[in-house]
Image (tube, grey):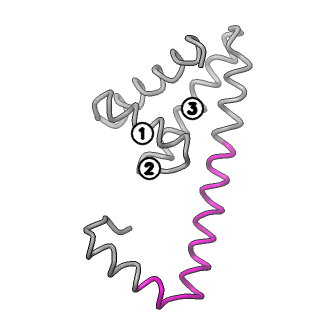
Amino acid sequence: MTPEQQRVLDTIAFRLAARLGIDRAEARIAVEDAADRRGPHLAEVDAEFRAVAAELAAAGQPAARFAAALHRAARRSVRDAVRERERGKRFVARHPDLVALDHRLDRLYERPTS
């Protein structure tokens, strides 16, 4: 990753920390988790990605291509998250017994359930 790309990701983490009232380390982890389309702050990170991408594109900076890529990645991330959620809903409808087993295992291993 180039220093310019790293600076953009740091900007996103800084803005996310200010927006959610979390520390920068947590915000950085949230940005990295969002890249894998997971984490509790996925929607907020996607919104910041889009905002930063729009700002970079509007400024006409050399980072405009990276900004466009960020914007496409944010759209793709949201679209994939919606598809994954719909897949999960269909699975729950088809296999309620396996869902109950999963919740029992979550309680057994003390994993948070949604």
Residue at the bottom extreme? Answer: 97
Q: Position of residue 96 (x, y in %)?
A: 49, 89
Residue at 29%, 35% (x, y): give it: 22
Q: Earlier in the sequence, mark 2 or mark 1?
A: 1
Amino acid type at circle 3 is Phe
Q: Earlier in the sequence, mark 1 or mark 3?
A: 1
Amino acid type at circle 1 is Ala
Viewer-proximal residue among 3 and 44: 3
Amino acid type at circle 2 is Gly
Q: Position of residue 51 (x, y in %)?
A: 57, 28
User: Which residue is labeled 2 in the image?
Assistant: 39
User: Which residue is labeled 3 in the image?
Assistant: 49
Query: Which quarter of the figure is the N terminus placed in?
Result: top right
In reply to whether residue 53 is colored magenta, the answer given is no
Q: Which mark is residue 7?
A: none
Residue at 65%, 30% (x, y): give it: 70
In reply to whether residue 95 is colored magenta, the answer given is yes
Viewer-proximal residue among 6 and 77: 6
Q: Position of residue 53 (x, y in %)?
A: 63, 25
Magenta segment: 75-100
Q: CA distance from mark 2 to mark 1?
A: 7 Å
Q: Are marks 2 and 1 in contact (CB under 8 Å)?
A: yes
Q: Considering the numbered disc 3 on the image, is that residue within a helix, a strand or a loop?
A: helix
Up/down of 5 relative to 45, above or below: above
Q: Considering the numbered disc 2 on the image, is that residue within a helix, a strand or a loop?
A: loop
User: Which residue is labeled 1 in the image?
Assistant: 30
Closer to the eye: label 1 or 3: 1
